[in-house]
Image (spheres, helix red, strand yellow):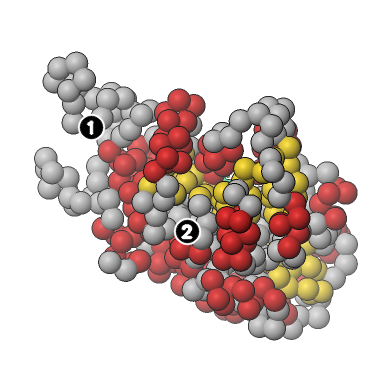
Amino acid sequence: MRFETKAIHSGQQPDVSTGAVIVPVFQTSTFQQEAVGRHKGYEYARTGNPTRTALETCLAELEGGRYGLAFSSGVAATAAVFSLFGKGTHIVLGDDLYGGTYRLVEKVFKQWGFSATYADVDNIESFRKSITAKTQIVWIESPTNPLLKVIDIKRLAKITREKKALLAVDNTFASPYFQNPLALGADIVVHSTTKYINGHSDIVGGAVVVNDEAIYNQLKFYQNAAGAVPGPWDCWLTLRGVRTLAVRMREHERNAQYLANFLSKHKKVAKVYYPGLKGTKDYKIASKQMSGFGGMLSFEIKGDFAAVENFFAGLKLFLLAESLGGVESLVCYPAKMTHGSMPEKERLKRGIKNNLIRISVGIENKYDLKDDMEQALS
Ligand SMILES: *Cc1c(COP(=O)(O)O)cnc(C)c1O
């Protein structure tokens, strides 16, 4: 089966007891046992729930993986992956990444005896240099947040295999429609399903997909033991969203490409970050490993914070809000929003300047989006 078909049918067979075409919301905390230990596969809803199973199966198949696990947020999914390792673990992370992942490493896992090195995502050899004998895992995003840099996943997977570390890819920005990291050699894929997978800005959720049975069993154990599971309603809404992932992603990309071109030519714009803009190193790698460039872009406006504020105040259609991947277009100010938890020095070192604006391009009409930007920039 191909992607669009899997999105609609994987894990979503009609309900056996009623014939309901749509997987029901199994709003129950517990399941009857016929005798002690004799049941239909479900005992208690933290451990497993049929609506969640449907979502987990679907997400695994969309990523081309064997096992999927759903969590109550993307950060909970990330924490589950880090929890595979013990005290003394060294993690290597790409230096352009979601602020909440940075915070989780710096403020939580370091307390528990982890150490971390941030490798330059523009230079893949810096990953090789950062890996030590204690490195258990390399963690990247590609495209990265918020600078939309693209890392050669196949090359990095070769390095991590040589060094006997696992490679985890946060695939939130690409979505499984445009990129499947497991096929490129990654060991673990993580999603904030809050974003494109659910796609309607109405739930918070996360997922992990893996191929290795031992890793899956450990994560499954952790999921039940630590308990950050999504409720059946959230799973149901996410499944409802995922069925249209392919059509949405195609529109997001079409609109993003159009706005990236528009902004590139605008006199008040200093720089545009979008992997679909030809002639960059990122474009080359993205063309090789992704089937599309996605719906996220960032740009630097000419001027300082006042210019940013002016632009935001002028927008009528784009909403100023955190998050991304919904059908509506959002703008965000990384310096104070998604990366507000990062010290300014660290942030500037990573190239996240005070005039950087990130856009989650929605699927409204592209001319309306362009018109809104045009008048806000004038
Ligand atoms: C939002 C996001 C996360 C965190 O996910 P939540 O669902 O907000 O917990 C992780 N990685 C990326 C790239 C994100 O955009």
**x and y, in percent, of residue 179 in the image:** 49, 65
Q: Residues within 10 Å of mark 2 (few under 14, many from 20)?
A: many
Q: Secondary structure at mark 2?
A: helix
In the figure, 355 relative to 276: above or below? above
Disc assigned to residue 182 = 2
CB-based contact (under 8 Å), mark 2 and mark 1: no
**Considering depth in this image, is 25 or 320 the residue closer to the camera?**
25
In the rendered structure, which amino acid carries the disc numbered 2?
Leu
| Residue 152 left/right relative to 244 | right
- Disc 2 CB within 8 Å of nearest ligand 1 atom: no
Location of residue 41 in the rendering, given as x and y in whole percent from the top left corner:
23, 32
Looking at the image, residue 178 sits to the left or right of residue 30; the answer is right
Quarter occupied by residue 234: top left
Q: CA distance from mark 2 to mark 1?
A: 28 Å
Image spot of residue 242 (x, y percent): 38, 56
Question: Does residue 370 appear anywhere in the picture?
Answer: no
Along the viewing direction, whichever of 275 and 113 lies nearer the viewer: 113
Mark 1, other Cα within 10 Å: few <14 / some 14–19 / many ≥20: few
The residue that appears at 62% across and 74% down in the rendered structure is 285
Determine which residue is flagged by label 1.
41
User: Looking at the image, how many numbered discs can be counted on the residues?
Assistant: 2
Q: Quadrant of residue 136?
A: top right
